[in-house]
Image: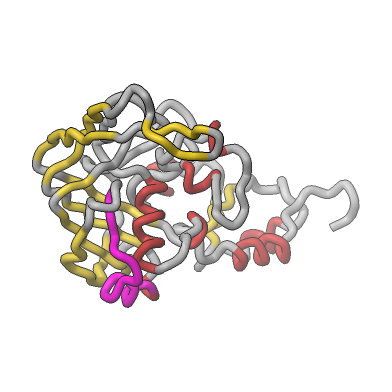
Amino acid sequence: MAKGETGIKIDCLKEIAKDYAGKLATPIYIGIRKGYLQNEEAVRALNGGEFVVDTPSWHRSKIHRSALNSLIMKTLLEVQFEGWTATPRMPFILSGNAICMATPTYSLLLGMIGCCLGRPVDPEEVRLGFRYTFDDTAEDVETRQRLINDNGKIIPHGKGTDAHRSEFHVNPRLIVWIDRLDWEEYFRYPIGAPTLGRSQDLLKIKQVQKVEVEAIAEAKISGCLLPFGGQLNSAGHWYSWRKPTGKILSAAAGLPRFPAFF
């Protein structure tokens, strides 16, 4: 195209589509008006396969149905966990009585998956969905030994011990769906013992299987976390063991950037 002409760089667009092919869940939609682009014929020739070219006035529901049709079936890895107790702590509450969130945080789930793999898991490595339920809540009462550093020597604190109440979930059940089918063996033979909260909150891997999932337009969901009132970033996205960002204190720890399913 000559300088000053309006058009779409076809080669650049195809290169971008190729680079992001693994992350795009739908075709790329291009809406154009007749006579607006100098290379209109070349753009319209893209229609089909990974590109859909039409007018901008397409009804939104039509695009939505087309997107759903492109996601008819997808194979995911489903891992079912269960245990006796779980302690998905409320982020940043480190004093007083410990209370639980209604579900695990996103960063906690990444840590649990990493335990099975035997290494830290970056958020960019996996897309996940989950559903969490439990039977009831209860409280532990623990005796804490207060200590003090006395010129390099650790000695009991003069105020003695105190009682600490810690809430926990009874009979937790967790189902995790991930798009990493190549990780199946790590859940069948985990390197570490998966836990949900404290080290004593051990989980049993009840079942590991591949499942076919189907896209739907609407659903009632529960047992997961969803963003609300704007963008919320997870600690998993803001901090990496390999590359600390220094922004961990400003992160809304554990609340997911993405909904609980894809």
Please determine whether, in this image, residue 39 is positioned above or below residue 231.
below
Please determine whether, in this image, residue 121 is positioned above or below residue 198.
below
Front-lying residue, 247 or 175: 247
Q: Quadrant of residue 191?
A: bottom left
Front-lying residue, 103 or 196: 196
Q: Is residue 228 left or right of residue 218?
A: right
Residue occupying image coordinates x 90% and y 51%: 3
Q: How is the image coloured?
A: secondary structure
Residue occupying image coordinates x 51% and y 35%: 251
Q: Point out the residue furthest to the right here.
A: 3
Residue occupying image coordinates x 22% and y 46%: 86
Q: Point out the residue furthest to the left here.
A: 135
The residue segment tinted magenta is: 183-197
In percent of width and height, residue 171 lies at: 12, 48
Q: Total marks drawn?
A: 0
Q: Is residue 236 left or right of residue 40?
A: left
Residue 193 in magenta? yes
In percent of width and height, residue 173 lies at: 17, 52
Look at the image and tell me in which quarter the N terminus lies. Answer: bottom right
Please determine whether, in this image, residue 122 is positioned above or below residue 248.
below
Q: Quadrant of residue 180?
A: bottom left
Front-lying residue, 95 or 171: 95
In percent of width and height, residue 168 lies at: 19, 39
- Residue 216 appears in view: no
Q: Is residue 220 left or right of residue 154?
A: left
- Residue 43 appears in view: yes
Residue occupying image coordinates x 32% and y 77%: 185
Please determine whether, in this image, residue 108 is positioned above or below residue 127.
above
Q: Main secondary structure of the magenta part?
A: loop
Residue 94 in magenta? no
